[in-house]
Image: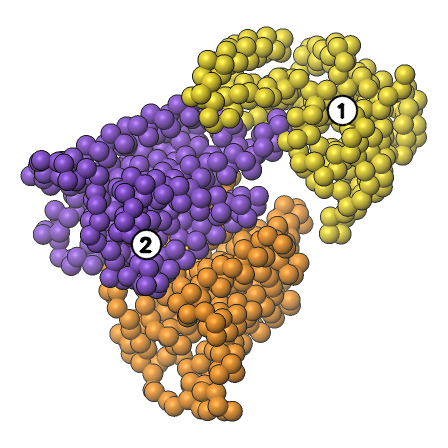
Chain colours: A purple, B orange, C yellow
């Protein structure tokens, strides 16, 4: 039982980190990133490939994070000067291209066969069940990232982000370089996703392109929408809720006449429905403040 | 070899064009990128499957009934979702996220009822023809021919009917249209019916050319967006030309790129357009 | 000494089929309060957008403090002292009034991401100073009691004031106000006129779009009348408001 809780706890922690990155982009700055999973993939694959190539794990992880952030910048440069929906379209294209590359360039990534056999942090020296350690590692990381993000968003820098989310024209009229802030946010959000990717690799011990389909981005989105865009506490709550929804429906499996394919599609249908319903009636999520995110101006 | 690709490109291009018309109309009139559009293509294909294979109707009847049903669902969604959001003056970003939710529901609804595998229509298998070393399958001819006919119908609709002209007016300036006495809500419903119906039609044709799969729309979403942006948002003729260009480019690209990366071609074209001529090559109604 | 702080030279802007600004020229002296009037659709807001950088002119030149700014992005123009308000109020609804204000000052160290941790002492000192200044300005505009309200909850007139108050936080050299008196109650409007003149004494220059002729007459040194994309008349308020073309625009069909 404990092992099961640790296992789902790990997923919760990793997805919370993943969603915190998205929240910085969407919740605080209003950027529609539909390609968040692409940066998760870059973080995971870079960490694993470098490590398998002989580099120490820490360097590989840092490289994964940095590379993810770098690609965030690359994606941002042509699109952030344009309307919000273009970013959405381009980012989803980006994450699909990443996935296609992972799938087809098997000389590098072993394509659909995926990668396994890589180091994990401190694995050699942990005397007890490694998963417990990874769980601790993940949650400590989550706490650190959470605290740093909270400091950021409550600072003058964070204030500028909110003004950009509200109305870029005003931010420009007050002398803020809107484009620069958006790039910074995209870099940071993508880097956080890259870190989550490395953690994901450690958790699964085996990564392949199927782990990085667009649906993963939308899991992060439902966490952000449920928890309250722009509310980091809510993200943590949202991550818990998503996992409970998953585990709960898995238990239900025995009692309903649907097979597992149907169950998983039903799950996603419910997630889609939640997205629609929340954006229509409760865009501030479960924890957000209504004034902060009510629709209409 | 290249001629074969050109032929394939024209067929795929006409399908993308058909789908892109509805997408560009929604973008031009309601101002947001509808990410669920592609999944209506899949819906159309499956409804036709239901009629044709499960219920045994002939394919042509199934085709037309499917278009009507799919278009009607599009209008229904306007009542349930889009109109209330317009009333709330919701911002466009929320609409995009809602459209993603609808996309997820549609796609997974299809998987729920029909499973993830691929299906085919109940059609006589006819041999294709070979001309000048190029193989053209029967299904390709049908797909292209039908698409062409529909494109002409759309042209007629937009240019000569009152509703069509009203749609163009809305695309240009929705407030001006309202003030000049056009019943905006009604025209918007027609727009959904036509746009989504066309998507359904495009879906059936695409399924004819390839297969009926729950994910089929997803492969075409990005190319359709690229076609819309290339042609100028809100401009149906631009979407048609854009669709042809995208279709051709994707096929011809296989001469020097692995065919798995066709999506990358649409994305690359889109990025180039966004960087250098974001209004598109034709006069769109928005930037 | 007549020094022009803003020079607009034959600036043109075409939108598809509409020539919004037609080789328009305008010159604003330092510390002058210039009113910009004209019928709806004359091109006043477009001109503002061109001057402040929201639109790029098709041709012509714009000089601010003798520097050409045509290619300068809006935020840079704001940093060199040119700030504008908007015709349709853009109060940042989902932020508090105080937060709106604290956004204003330029060169805040805390706005650079590293400084939050590397220079945290400096950042909090600047925050305190900014807060003091914000409360002062809010007090003048009689909005101190609303400092923690979300700006979206303010009335139309209050939002206008907030926009202006917020612009003052950036210490502009020149303020371009787009219909600042619309929706503001007469008492406060009068107070605003006094305040604008006070700010002018301290060195600020103003270019104000306004439809309320009596009010704009009271506050401006000169009026520029714009019609169909061009400034066709300039002079003292007394002269301009008597001109038949102006009367025609405001009584005949304009408003």
- Reply above or below: A141 against B237: above
Q: Residue at x 67, y 12 (%)?
A: C188
Q: Position of residue C103 (x, y in %)?
A: 55, 22
> Where is residue C171, by image quadrant?
top right
Q: Residue C63 occupies which quadrant of the picture?
A: top right
Q: Residues within 10 Å of mark 1 (few under 14, many from 20)?
A: many
Write down the chain letter for disc 2: A
Secondary-structure class at tag 1:
strand
> Which residue is at a point 40% across and 49% down the rendered structure image?
A35
Residue for badge 1? C208
Res. C32 visible in picture: yes
- Say which mark, if any, is on residue B207: none
Left or right relative to C45: residue C98: left
Examine the image and state in which quarter residue A107 appears: bottom left
Q: Which mark is residue A213?
A: 2
Q: Residue at x 48, y 48 (%)?
A: A75
Q: Identify the residue at horizontal 35%, vertical 81% (top origin).
A: B58
Chain letter for the residue marked with disc 1 in the picture: C
Viewed as shown, does residue A115 lie left or right of B170?
Answer: left
């Amino acid at each position: 039982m404990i092992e099961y809780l640790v296992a789902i706890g790990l997923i919760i922690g990793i997805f919370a980190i993943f969603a915190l990155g998205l929240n910085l982009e969407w919740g605080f700055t209003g950027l529609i990133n539909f390609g968040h999973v692409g940066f998760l993939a870059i973080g995971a694959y870079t960490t694993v490939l470098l490590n398998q190539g002989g580099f120490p794990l820490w360097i590989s992880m840092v490289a994964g994070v940095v590379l993810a952030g770098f690609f965030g910048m690359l994606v941002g440069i042509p699109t952030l000067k344009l309307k919000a929906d273009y970013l959405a379209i381009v980012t989803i294209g980006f994450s699909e291209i990443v996935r296609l590359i992972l799938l087809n360039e098997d000389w590098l990534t072993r394509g659909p066969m995926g990668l396994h056999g890589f180091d994990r942090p401190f694995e050699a020296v942990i005397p007890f069940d490694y998963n417990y350690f990874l769980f601790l590692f993940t949650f400590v990381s989550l706490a650190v990232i959470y605290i740093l993000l909270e400091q950021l968003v409550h600072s003058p820098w964070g204030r500028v982000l909110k003004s950009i989310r509200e109305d870029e024209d005003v931010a420009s009229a007050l002398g803020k370089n809107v484009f620069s802030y958006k790039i910074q946010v995209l870099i940071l959000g993508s880097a956080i996703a890259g870190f989550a990717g490395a953690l994901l690799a450690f958790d699964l011990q085996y990564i392949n392109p199927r782990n990085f389909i667009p649906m993963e981005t939308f899991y992060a989105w439902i966490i952000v929408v449920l928890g309250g865009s722009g509310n980091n506490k809510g993200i943590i709550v949202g991550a818990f809720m998503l996992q409970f929804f998953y585990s709960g429906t898995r238990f239900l499996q025995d009692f309903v006449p649907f097979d597992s394919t149907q169950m998983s599609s039903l799950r996603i249908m419910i997630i889609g429905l939640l997205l629609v319903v929340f954006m229509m009636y409760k865009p501030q999520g479960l924890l957000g403040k209504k004034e902060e995110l009510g629709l209409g101006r | 070899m290249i001629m074969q690709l050109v032929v394939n490109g024209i067929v795929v291009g006409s399908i993308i064009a058909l789908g892109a018309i509805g997408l560009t109309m929604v973008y031009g009139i309601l101002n947001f990128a509808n990410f669920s559009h592609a999944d209506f293509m899949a819906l159309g294909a499956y409804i036709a499957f239901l009629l044709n294979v499960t219920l045994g109707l002939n394919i042509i009847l199934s085709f037309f009934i499917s278009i009507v049903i799919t278009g009607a669902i599009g209008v229904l969604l306007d009542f349930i979702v889009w109109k209330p959001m317009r009333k709330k003056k919701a911002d466009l970003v929320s609409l995009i996220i809602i459209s993603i939710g609808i996309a997820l529901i549609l796609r997974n609804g299809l998987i729920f009822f029909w499973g993830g595998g691929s299906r085919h229509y109940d059609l006589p298998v006819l041999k294709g023809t070979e001309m000048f070393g190029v193989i053209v399958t029967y299904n390709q001819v049908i797909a292209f021919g039908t698409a062409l006919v529909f494109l002409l119908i759309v042209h007629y609709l937009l240019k000569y009917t009152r509703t069509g002209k009203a749609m163009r007016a809305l695309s240009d300036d929705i407030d001006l249209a309202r003030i000049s006495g056009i019943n905006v809500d009604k025209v918007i419903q027609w727009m959904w019916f036509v746009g989504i119906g066309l998507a359904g039609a495009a879906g059936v044709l695409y399924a004819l050319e390839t297969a009926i799969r729950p994910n089929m729309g997803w492969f075409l979403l990005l190319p359709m967006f690229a076609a819309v942006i290339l042609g100028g948002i809100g401009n149906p003729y631009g979407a048609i030309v854009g669709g042809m260009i995208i279709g051709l480019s994707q096929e011809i690209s296989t001469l020097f790129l692995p065919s798995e990366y066709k999506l990358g071609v649409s994305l690359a074209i889109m990025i180039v357009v966004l960087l250098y001529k974001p209004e598109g090559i034709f006069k769109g109604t928005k930037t | 000494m007549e020094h022009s702080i803003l020079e607009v030279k034959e600036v043109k802007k075409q939108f598809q089929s509409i020539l919004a600004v037609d080789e328009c020229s305008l010159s604003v002296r330092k510390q002058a309060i210039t009113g910009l009037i004209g019928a709806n659709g004359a091109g006043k807001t477009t001109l503002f957008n061109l001057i402040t950088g929201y639109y790029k002119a098709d041709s012509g030149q714009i000089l601010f403090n003798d520097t050409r700014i045509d290619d300068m992005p809006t935020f840079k123009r704001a940093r060199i002292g040119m700030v504008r308000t908007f015709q349709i109020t853009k109060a940042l609804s989902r932020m508090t009034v105080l937060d709106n204000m604290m956004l204003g000052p330029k060169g805040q160290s805390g706005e650079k991401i590293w400084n939050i941790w590397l220079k945290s002492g400096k950042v909090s000192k600047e925050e305190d100073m900014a807060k003091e200044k914000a409360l002062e300005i809010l007090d003048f505009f009689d909005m101190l009691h609303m400092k923690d309200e979300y700006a979206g909850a303010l009335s139309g007139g209050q939002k206008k004031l907030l926009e202006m108050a917020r612009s003052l936080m950036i210490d502009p050299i020149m303020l371009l106000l787009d219909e600042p008196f619309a929706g503001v109650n007469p008492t406060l409007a009068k107070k605003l006129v006094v305040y604008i003149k006070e700010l002018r004494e301290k060195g600020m220059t103003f270019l104000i779009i306004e439809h309320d002729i009596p009010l704009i007459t009271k506050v401006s040194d000169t009026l520029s009348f714009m019609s169909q994309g061009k400034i066709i008349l300039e002079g003292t308020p007394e002269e301009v408001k008597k001109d038949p073309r102006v009367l025609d625009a405001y009584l005949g069909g304009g408003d």
